[in-house]
Image (cartoon, rainbow, N blue to C red):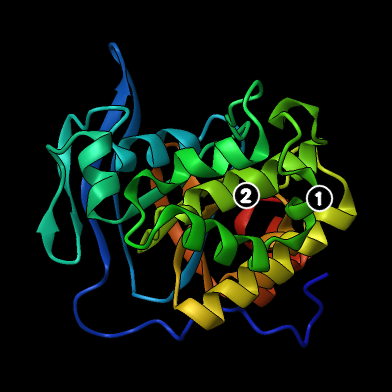
Amino acid sequence: MGGPQSRPPGGEPRTGEPLLAVAGLHAGYGRIPILGGVSLGVGAGEFVGILGHNGMGKTTLLRTLMGYLPATAGTVALAGRPITALSPTARARAGMGYVPQGREIFPALSVRENLRMGCLLARAGEEATIAEILETFPRLKAYLDRPGGALSGGEQQLLALARCLCGGPRIVLLDEPTEGIQPSIIEELVETLGAIGRARGLTVLLVEQNLGFISALSNRVLILQKGVITREVPPDVARDRQMMDEFVGMA
């Protein structure tokens, strides 16, 4: 997966105003600070990875960007529009999609019903949107009437991503998508996300600890340590455990 000749699906980092602009972002839980002034930009059509050990603030960052956790300082803008004070629903309507760690599908609902839930923000009709999504996720076609909770962990991850994409987001925040899933589904995720990125110009901010996965998909990788971005590395460095350990202390 993601060998030396693989090409990330997103475009080259673009100059000018980024699609997602984050400046001096602080957040935490009660009196416990987690983010200590995160600043980053993600260009339209770009795939940006975030690496960091457990407890460094990766999930907190995505939850704050999506509005589930309020920022205590700093700003978030989407396509030049300030969204720091908006609710998660308003951010979703503005074009932000979120696939959380643990997937959080609706286990008692069928695959079709899960996808219908994702269509609430769709611009096209529900049937047309689901039909298009199933062309991208053909594995789900055989499971449309099966409860989401009956799927394997990897299939649930595909469903969570498909449900998110039903809403037509401009940027997807993707949290630890390879956690607890089988290698064959990880390969499928790489291929699917790569195809979507190239075909739709989708923008992705990806939190992940699987070095092969993040390097196969990302145009560049940001290192998050103790709640701040400490440096940026190219995907070929992120792919090499020895280099990550020697130069970044991340392996």
Q: Position of residue 198 (x, y in %)?
A: 55, 82
The extreme top residue here reads 30
Question: In the image, 231: left or right of 54?
Answer: left
Q: Is residue 220 visible?
A: yes
**Tag in front: 1 or 2:** 1
What is the quadrant of the N terminus in the image?
Answer: bottom right
Judge the density around disc 2: few (<14), some (14-19), many (≥20) Cα neighbours within 10 Å. Answer: many
Q: Residue at x 53, y 47 (%)?
A: 163
Q: Amino acid at mark 2?
A: Glu
Q: Residue at x 57, y 72 (%)?
A: 196
Residue pointed to by mark 1: 142
Q: Residue at x 77, y 73 (%)?
A: 2
- Alpha-carbon span between mark 1 and mark 2: 29 Å
Q: Is residue 241 visible?
A: no
Residue pointed to by mark 2: 208
Q: Amino acid at mark 1?
A: Ala
Question: Tag 2's secondary structure?
Answer: loop
Q: Residue at x 70, y 31 (%)?
A: 148
Q: Earlier in the sequence, mark 1 or mark 2?
A: 1
Front-most of residues 183 and 33: 183
Question: In the image, 182: left or right of 178?
Answer: right
